[in-house]
């Protein structure tokens, strides 16, 4: 029954606004993952549709992450951050909540309320949702302390440890195997991204004191754990509508970001007001962060953390290339070499699939 | 018959001075490559002995190339090059000739003169030997002109194009297949070596004019072609003693280096004398070059150009690490990243073998 509904969808031909249809309706197709695994032995049309969906969310994430970085550069060029970052983060979570509710409203109108798309939940289901938000909060608080040991460009370089931590935790927590070739590809991805970000002052990173390394590793583990744990939560109930899952994730995101406002920016917000220093760029950045946050959830649902890491790494490279045209950036030789290594890594990740024991 | 002789050698147990025995006697085992391919289906003891020999020559090349680079740094620290490089090159060829003759003399004494180890040759056999020496001469002459477009550190970086040209020509001329994973590994080797050599002024390379790139590519092709052609010559007659093959290669090396002296350094040599500016370091460098030249030939005979490229790349990395202790060099972050990429490349080269269709 479920299977037949997907077949019918495929007959509709090209979907003109795939991303919107993913965000909004057609949630029926989401529940068929496990069924397909049983029924479809070859690359059937439902496999093709899954592949299409996976590609679209990955592409959306890549484009949104690139434009996000470009907006950050733009906002830096336009002047200093005048607004408080914690209020902006809170608004991002609130906006994502609103988007999820709007998508759900449309689904309820079209398909009625079912067990899979109703908002009400059990304590058993909802109890795990605060964990990723809490992990991100701890990570963001740590971020203030790591700058005592590392400067900002150094921190950008150490952040690439995320790639390795995500891979390791993905293996341990989700118990999914990567082939040896894919592990090699993952190490290359980390080395390639770091190489692409090298600049003449990068060598300072090697002088990072032990505490700095420790914090960078803890932060990479927190961030990797939050990502992998989110995937585990979302995939635990494959038939549950992604917008409901997002709604609950983002509600706790709002709660924890409210805590961050209280801890870090209470005085500034109380004296100058919540929206002090907001500009058009700030609004665009918040909108972009909200959309890329949703894209990340979609990638977790329809693909996995590995795809997410590759997607954001490619976005980093794309950003640099686009910045050449927008901001007259110069690409370094290190950037070219890093890009080559990342490209080979992507090839090896897919070539390594053949070997994987399933 | 040939096969049995190898088996008997293996029974002798551990060879105490493998490198010398390779340079000297036991030439009978050289002729069995093709026989083994037919007889031995599994990793037999002769396979093991071949593997051992391959490892020893590879290790020798790596160590010699590393110490070569260290001698160059040492000589630079001690002062400028006072001697003429062409006379040193000539002496290297002469010394290699002498070593080959000495090794042959020992073999003749022990085993008598056979068809495989006699020095006299046919025009058919000897006619191809001048080609590698001529190619190197053209490449060395071009080297003087490329510095009009690229500075010395830039040239060091562009020299890594050799890696790619060797891979491509190895595939085309020797018609040996590399698997897709091995090709990916080769691209990584080139990117990794270049990354490891990056320094703050490396970005100049990107401003290299078109003529500079063209010359760098032509030089890479000449050098790659010379290497691959040497392997083709040496492997064409597997049963021929390597020392005879070396003798003829080096005789033509002497001839072409004599031409180089006449073209480039005639005045200096005529006025100041052949050995002007020679020091202890110069002598050590000549000795080292001669030994590593012989190691290269051995690698061509018992392994191949791909092994040679990996061996010299690892030597480059080793040199940097040793220089930290000898000359208090600082290793850059780029060096670490490049070393990681090279290490993964080595792993992939061997992992890629499994896939190769034979």
Image (spheres, coloured by chain):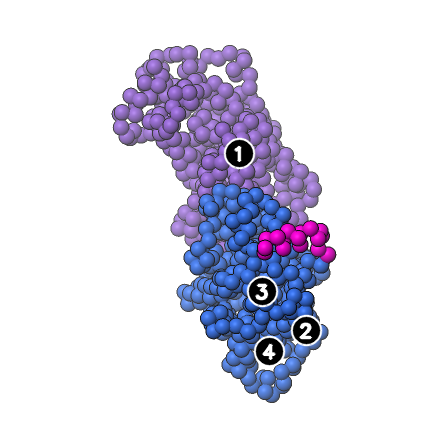
Chain colours: A purple, B blue
Q: Kindly identify which chain the residue marked by label 4 belongs to.
A: B
Tell me if A236 is positioned left or right of A1 in this view.
right
Name the spot of residue A22 as percent of width and height, x first.
37, 26
The residue closer to the viewer here, A162 or B234, is: B234
Tell me if A69 is positioned left or right of B301 in this view.
left
As displayed, is residue B214 above or below residue B95?
above
Q: Residue at x 51, y 49 (%)?
A: B38
As displayed, is residue B130 above or below residue B179?
below
Q: CA distance from mark 3 to mark 1?
A: 45 Å
Q: Give, as a single range, the part of the protein colored magenta.
A: B1-16
Along the polypeptide, which appears first: circle 3 or circle 4?
A: 4
The residue closer to the viewer here, A276 or B335, is: B335
> Label for residue B283?
2
Asked if residue B2 is among those painted magenta in the image, a careful observer would answer yes
> Label for residue A251?
none
> Label for residue A178?
1
C-beta proximity under 8 Å, tags 4 and 1: no
């Amino acid at each position: 029954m479920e299977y037949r509904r997907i077949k019918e969808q495929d007959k509709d031909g090209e979907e003109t606004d795939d991303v919107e249809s993913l965000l909004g309706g057609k949630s029926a197709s989401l529940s068929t993952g496990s069924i397909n695994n049983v029924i479809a032995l070859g690359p059937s049309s439902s496999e093709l549709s899954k592949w299409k969906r996976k590609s679209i969310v990955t592409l959306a994430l890549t484009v949104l992450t690139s434009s996000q970085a470009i907006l950050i550069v733009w906002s830096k060029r336009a002047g200093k951050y005048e607004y408080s970052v914690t209020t902006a983060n809170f608004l991002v979570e609130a906006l994502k909540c609103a988007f999820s509710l709007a998508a759900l409203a449309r689904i309820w109108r079209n398909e009625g309320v079912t067990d899979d798309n109703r908002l009400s939940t059990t304590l058993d289901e909802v109890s795990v949702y605060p964990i990723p938000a809490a992990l991100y909060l701890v990570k963001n608080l740590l971020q203030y302390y790591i700058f005592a040991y590392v400067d900002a460009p150094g921190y950008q370089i150490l952040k690439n440890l995320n790639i390795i931590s995500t891979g390791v935790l993905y293996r341990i927590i989700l118990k999914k195997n990567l082939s040896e070739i894919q592990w090699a590809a993952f190490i290359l991805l980390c080395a390639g991204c770091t190489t692409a970000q090298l600049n003449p002052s990068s060598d300072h990173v090697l002088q990072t004191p032990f505490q700095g390394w420790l914090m960078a590793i803890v932060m990479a583990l927190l961030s990797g754990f939050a990502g992998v744990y989110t995937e585990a939560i979302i995939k635990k109930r494959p038939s549950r509508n992604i917008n409901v899952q997002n709604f609950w994730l983002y509600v706790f995101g709002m709660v924890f970001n409210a805590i961050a406002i209280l801890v870090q920016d209470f005085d500034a917000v109380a004296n100058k007001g919540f929206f002090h220093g907001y500009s058009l760029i700030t609004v665009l950045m918040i909108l972009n962060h909200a959309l890329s946050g949703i894209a990340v959830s979609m990638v977790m649902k329809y693909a996995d953390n590995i795809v997410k890491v590759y997607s954001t790494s490619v976005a980093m490279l794309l950003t640099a290339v686009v910045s050449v045209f927008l901001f007259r950036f110069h690409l370094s030789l290190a950037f070219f070499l890093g890009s080559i290594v990342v490209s080979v890594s992507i090839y090896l990740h897919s070539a390594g699939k053949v070997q994987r024991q399933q």
